[in-house]
């Protein structure tokens, strides 16, 4: 019988053979201390780190996440679901559970009867109310970080962002030589207490690969810009969710200071905890206005449930990304829809 505990056991076995699984689907990956990252093979994505399998010893070990389209929502976030999603993509149809089991057993090299059911996980009620996000001590001070960067970054000035907002968010080009972020624009990431937790680097020149690079060990257990937005979230009782850092900058330039980024198209449990703790009662969802962004909006509502009120504003026809709007367009088009959820400046 294929029970949830049996699927869990198969997933645990797959983690021991993960290189064989990835090789079968011809997946080239980048290895980080806590995860393997690669373009999502379930929907045929092209973002170098659009999908990842967690490999460290946390509660997420052995799970996977598609940051761009949330594919794990359809196929469950265990490695069994990952395999089923990959098989379905290659077959151009949703393969059956039995087909997935047969494939997994072939990879593992065991018969079905040899797989013992994993014990059910018990979660005490007290654990639910005492959820805490894993935080490590800051590895570098903000001032030391600023000294390593040419702020504001000329690259983003050329993309139409103002000097002030880039300075506020410490966005600059790496001036150090022979470092992982050399030749890149660096976007520092701070947690809600302004502790540096990592960065995202964007290659300035085309020959530098990959185009986007996260610092080693970075975990998506923060909301980008929450360190600056938390006071305004309390004042308005609302938070504005966007996908990327550039979206946050543009909204801040337009006076919408309660905006935070979720690093892609998927909200995770740690980020949900931060939303719960932020004091927000209303969530304005401004993820991109394309299929992935619309799916993200649905996923956010699904994972957050009845905790908040939700607002999904209309967008100017033909515009996909809120970061592509001008400040004037934001004030003329979005402000009227967000009355009561932002402080209009």
Image (cartoon, rainbow, N blue to C red):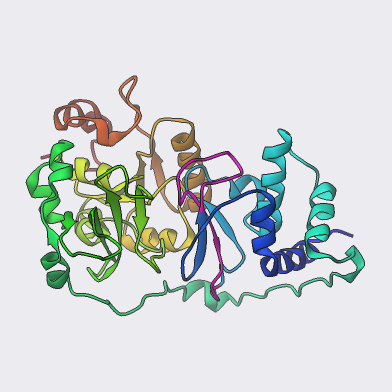
Q: State the image coordinates of residue 169 (x, y, percent, origin top left).
A: 17, 55
Residue located at (78% from left, 57% from top): 104
Residue located at (40% from left, 45% from top): 309
Camera-nearest residue between 51 and 245: 51
Camera-nearest residue between 145 and 116: 145
Residue located at (56% from left, 71% from top): 59
Residue, far left: 164
Q: Does residue 97 appear to the left or right of 30 in the view shown? A: right
Q: State the image coordinates of residue 218 (x, y, percent, origin top left).
A: 38, 65
Q: Main secondary structure of the magenta part?
A: loop
Q: Does residue 75 appear to the left or right of 68 in the view shown? A: right
* Number of residue marks: 0
Residue located at (80% from left, 44% from top): 96
- The quarter of the picture where the C terminus appears is top left
Q: Does residue 49 appear to the left or right of 139 in the view shown? A: right
Q: State the image coordinates of residue 69 (x, y, percent, origin top left).
A: 51, 42
- The quarter of the picture where the N terminus appears is bottom right
Camera-nearest residue between 252 and 178: 178
Asked whether residue 313 appears in the rendered view, the answer is: yes
Q: Is residue 35 above or below residue 322?
A: below
Camera-nearest residue between 45 and 302: 45
Asked whether residue 255 appears in the rendered view, the answer is: no
Residue bounds of the magenta highlight:
38-58
Residue 51, magenta (yes or no):
yes
Q: State the image coordinates of residue 314 (x, y, percent, origin top left).
A: 35, 27
Q: Does residue 149 appear to the left or right of 67 in the view shown? A: left
């Amino acid at each position: 019988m294929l029970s949830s505990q049996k699927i869990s056991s198969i997933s645990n076995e797959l983690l021991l053979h993960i290189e064989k699984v990835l090789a079968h689907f011809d997946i080239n990956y980048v290895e980080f201390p806590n995860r393997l990252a690669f373009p999502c093979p379930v929907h045929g994505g092209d973002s170098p780190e659009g999908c990842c399998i967690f490999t460290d010893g946390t509660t997420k070990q052995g799970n996977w996440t598609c940051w761009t389209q949330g594919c794990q929502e359809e196929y469950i976030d265990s490695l069994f679901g990952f395999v089923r999603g990959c098989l379905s993509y290659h077959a151009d149809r949703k393969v059956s559970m039995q087909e997935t089991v047969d494939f997994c057993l072939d990879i593992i090299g065991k018969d079905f009867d040899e797989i013992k059911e994993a014990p059910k996980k018990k979660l005490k009620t007290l654990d639910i109310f005492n959820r805490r996000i894993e935080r490590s001590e800051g590895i570098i001070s903000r001032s030391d970080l600023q000294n390593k960067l040419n702020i504001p970054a000329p690259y983003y000035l050329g993309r139409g962002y103002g000097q002030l907002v880039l300075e506020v968010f410490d966005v600059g080009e790496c001036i150090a030589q022979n470092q992982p972020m050399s030749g890149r624009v660096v976007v520092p990431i701070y947690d809600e207490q302004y502790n540096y937790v990592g960065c995202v680097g964007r290659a300035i020149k085309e020959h530098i690969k990959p185009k986007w690079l996260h610092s080693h060990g970075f975990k998506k257990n923060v909301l980008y810009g929450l360190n600056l937005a938390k006071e305004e979230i309390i004042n308005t009782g609302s938070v504005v969710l966007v996908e990327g850092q550039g979206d946050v900058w543009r909204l801040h330039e337009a006076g919408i200071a309660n905006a935070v980024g979720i690093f892609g198209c998927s909200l995770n449990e740690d980020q949900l905890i931060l939303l719960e703790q932020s004091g927000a009662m209303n969530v304005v969802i401004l993820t991109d206005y394309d299929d992935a962004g619309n799916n993200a909006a649905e996923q956010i509502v699904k994972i957050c449930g009845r905790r908040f009120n939700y607002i999904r504003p209309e967008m100017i026809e033909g515009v996909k990304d809120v970061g592509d709007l001008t400040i004037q367009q934001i004030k003329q088009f979005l402000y009227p829809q967000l009355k009561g959820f932002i402080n209009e400046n």
